[in-house]
Amino acid sequence: MSNKRTPKDCSDCGGCVRPKSITQEYERDGVRVSVSGVQVLECEKCGEVYFEPGGAQALVEAAESLFALARRTNQHKGKLIGAVS
Ligand SMILES: [Zn+2]
């Protein structure tokens, strides 16, 4: 994951970046959560992923909310998925 600012071209290799929807998974204390349908820009050449400004932070907050939900509902072995469509 990257905290770099959203570019028009990849700042690592200069390749073109394209909009893409990804699924990001997090694991903590045996609980897995997944946020899918997240819009990012991905470099065609090297695969570097760029989030919209604030997007990475919002994604972390979404994952935190899912972890909180898992704790509250005792889903220690389960997997929670938050989807954007
Ligand atoms: Zn690149």
Image (cartoon, rainbow, N blue to C red):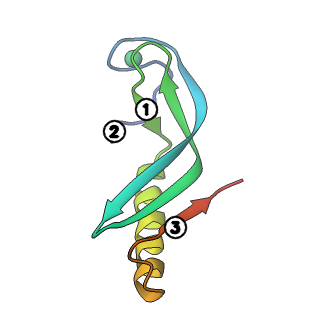
Task: Assign ligand 1 to one image quadrant.
Answer: top left
Give the mark nearer the N terminus: 2 vs 1.
2
Could you tell me how many numbered marks the image carries? 3
Helix, strand or loop at disc 1? strand
Q: Is mark 2 within 8 Å of ligand 1?
A: no
The label number, if any, that marks residue 49 in the structure image: 1
Residue pictured at 44% horizontal, 88% vertical: 72
| Residue 18 falls in image quadrant | top right
Q: Which of the 4 image quarters holds residue 84?
A: bottom right
Q: Which residue is at a point 60% across and 30% down the rendered structure image? A: 19
- Cβ–Cβ under 8 Å for marks 2 and 1: yes
Residue in view at x 48 percent, y 50 percent:
55
Q: CA distance from mark 3 to mark 2?
A: 24 Å
Q: Nearer the viewer, residue 15 or 26?
A: 26
Query: Looking at the picture, does residue 74 appear above or below residue 28?
Result: below
In this orientation, which residue lies closer to the viewer: 16 or 24? 24
> Callout 3 environment at 10 Å: few (<14), some (14 to 19), or many (20+)?
some
Residue at (42, 50) in percent of width and height: 56
Question: Which amino acid does the dot numbered 2 rest on?
Answer: Ser
**Which of the two residues, 47 or 28, is positioned nearer the viewer here?**
28
Q: CA distance from mark 1 to mark 3?
A: 23 Å
Q: Amino acid at mark 3?
A: Leu
The mark closer to the camera, 1 or 3, is 3
**Mark 1 or 3, nearer chain start:** 1
**Residue identifier under label 3:** 80
Q: Along the polypeptide, which appears first: circle 3 or circle 2?
A: 2
Percent position of residue 57, x then y: 40, 57
Task: State left or right for residue 18 relative to residue 77.
Answer: right
Q: Position of residue 73 (x, y in %)?
A: 48, 86
Task: Give the distance between the C-alpha atoms of the residues marked 2 and 1, in whole angstroms.
Answer: 7 Å
| Residue with the mark numbered 2 | 2
